[in-house]
Amino acid sequence: MTISQGLSWMKALKQRHQELVGLRNENSQKTDRLFGEQKVITHKPVYDVKKLDKMVNRVAMEVRKLDESIKETNAKTPIEKYEKDETVFGELE
């Protein structure tokens, strides 16, 4: 995997993580609402909260592992066709 591909995969993982966190937050509680005297609306969890939480944690762990690998690879990779020239900052007289 190239660094570019890794960064794209990282973006997809982070997006999926956000989706799962939102789903977990919406799904984590049971809500009963009473409207008037006869209408009761009940919201119950759709997904197994434990399984959903494991999925969130697994994606978060994958994000961390990929981030560490990208940083490690980046630290070993020299920048090609560029020479650092500090004289570009210039001197004021």
Image (cartoon, rainbow, N blue to C red):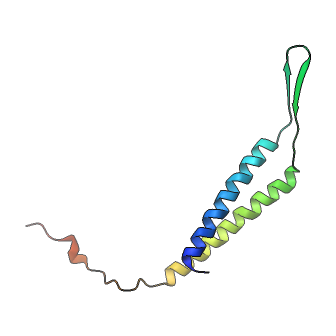
Which of the pair 3/54 is nearer the observer? 3
Q: In this view, does 29 lie above or below 1?
A: above
Q: Please name the residue shown 88% across and 38% down the image.
A: 44
Q: Is residue 63 left or right of residue 45?
A: left
Image quadrant in which you'd find residue 61: bottom right
Image quarter in which the C terminus is found: bottom left
Image quadrant in which you'd find residue 57: bottom right
Q: Please name the residue shown 66% across and 71% down the image.
A: 65
Image quadrant in which you'd find residue 83: bottom left
Q: Please name the residue shown 34% across and 83% down the image.
A: 82
Q: Is residue 92 above or below residue 29?
A: below
Image quarter in which the N terminus is found: bottom right
Query: x%, y% of residue 29?
Result: 83, 39
Q: Please name the residue shown 79% across and 60% down the image.
A: 55
Query: x%, y% of residue 33?
Result: 84, 25
Q: In this view, does 93 lie to the left or right of 64?
A: left
Query: x%, y% of residue 40?
Result: 89, 23
